[in-house]
Amino acid sequence: MHPLITIAGTHSGCGKTTVSLALMAALRRAGFAVQPFKAGPDFIDTGHHGTVTGRQGQNIDGWIMGRQACCELVSRAMSNPAGHLADIGVIEGVMGLFDGASGSCDSGSTAQLASWLQAPVVLVADARSMARSAAALVSGYVRFDPHLPFAGVIFNRVGSSNHRSLIAEAMRAACPDIPVLGFLPRDESLEIPARHLGLNTAAESPLTAGVQDRLARWFTAGVSLDSILTAARRAAARRAAASRAATRQTAECQAAERAGQCVTRQSGSAPDGIVQSRSTAQAPVRIGVSADEAFCFVYAENLRLLQSAGAELVFFSPLHDAHLPAGLHGVYLTGGYPELHADRLYENTLMRTAVYDFSLAGGIVYAECGGFMYLMQQLYDQQGASWPMCGCLPFSCAMGTRFRALGYRQVRTTADSPLGAAGTVLRGHEFHYSHLCAPPAGDDTMNITNIYDATDRNGTPLNSGTGDAPAAAGHLQRNTLGSYVHLHFASCPDAARAFVGACRRSSVTTP
């Protein structure tokens, strides 16, 4: 069993990303191979994780993926395709430790993942403006779920040696049973700048070797690295012992069954509606995937599932390339920040024309959020400037100053599409600052259909939005499907297989 550790926060903004990156940098500096994971649907943190660890960051989310898919992804990622085993997995949490899809249970939370994976929790507590109260805060978190495995607490943003002494004294007096792993001094220069949708991306705020070294030194000067490693290894040993016991029990049941003493056994079906992946022996299908500064939001598991279904992924840049790659059977336009690069996307007329021609000819195109915006007729930036985009879908979008949609989404398709037959159910997430403008009257609007029946985390239908078009809609025209929702294919691997199958059957390819 691989050692795992969870870095969780008391709340968003407590510094858990900085602490997670610093821990990863310290482990790498000490010679360990580190596999990073991000709880929740955030794309940006995984990019920073990959920069520090040299391994692909992975998103895991209990509400979206279900237990089995999360556990299988973690196990698989701990050994990369080249067979290089990770020494330890570091899971960065989302929001506060117990925050997720529900106010009454741990669905979608960091706590749920830590419990499923038995990955001990290191709680990051923002110590600013607190002394003895910090002990009350930590005590509440640790005792809220007595079954959750805790490694201890790290106090972040400590202001002085006196501040540290007061917190340490309070913890000794009120919480002697909770390990204090260390104290990290306030250092705003180590924090990654942020904008709408979250932190700046890895491409914009690169974690250079020098910055990584500073992060590692900051961490090891204030926190016991050995205590974290010990907690992770002990938990791994307990998981291994439990696994051996389960294997023995299964063997005994099978022996009893052969002897006619056991008539029932556990079903092998996947829980939570998660369909187990199947491999394909057919020839690869070339699918173009957008990847550059403007389009950098995609779940790594989505790409793996496409490859597992027989796709040969060909990455291209709508910003820098003049044409789509040759011989593509389909195009996957990922999310990102097209609004920050609208002028350059507009100036690349050859690429916009290539995407438009492929869509118009009936080529298979699937686009999410930023990629969806790129398919529209116009993009209005925050200054009100209008930038023509590809024109594949009869919409325009306008940027706002605050988010227009945020939250979990479940969609059920109401018509056949590149993602499968009508009735296909997937889960994902929606978060954007732009909104759709009303589609203009014309022939193009006659042939476009909203094929998503979408609900939020509570199952509440989302049939009206803040703009003039339905929220969380999936707009299908010809074989082009675009939506603001980022769907996670691990919630329905059949959708990845359907997409590859649609591309395989298509007679339209790029020149």
Image: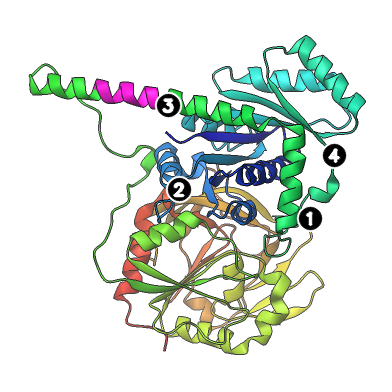
The image quadrant that residue 31 belongs to is top right
Indicate which disc, 2 or 4, sits on the residue closer to the N terminus: 2
Q: Are marks 3 and 2 in contact (CB under 8 Å)?
A: no
Q: Which residues are magenta?
A: 239-249
Residue at left offset 52%, top offset 82%: 355
Q: Few, some or many C-alpha atoms within 10 Å of disc 4 (few <14, some 14-19, many ≥20)?
A: some
Tag 2 secondary structure:
helix
Indicate which disc, 2 or 1, sits on the residue closer to the N terminus: 2
> Does the image show residue 360?
yes
Indicate which disc, 1 or 4, sits on the residue closer to the N terminus: 4
The image quadrant that residue 163 belongs to is top right
Q: Locate residue 108, reporting x and y percent.
A: 55, 38
How far is mark 2 from mark 1, CA to CA?
29 Å
Q: Few, some or many C-alpha atoms within 10 Å of disc 2 (few <14, some 14-19, many ≥20)?
A: many
> Label 1 belongs to which residue?
193
Q: From what the image shows, is residue 342 above or below residue 180?
A: below
Magenta includes 242?
A: yes
* Residue type marked 3: Arg
Number of disc labels: 4
473 with respect to 14 (left or right): left
* Residue type marked 2: Ala
Image disc number at residue 239: 3
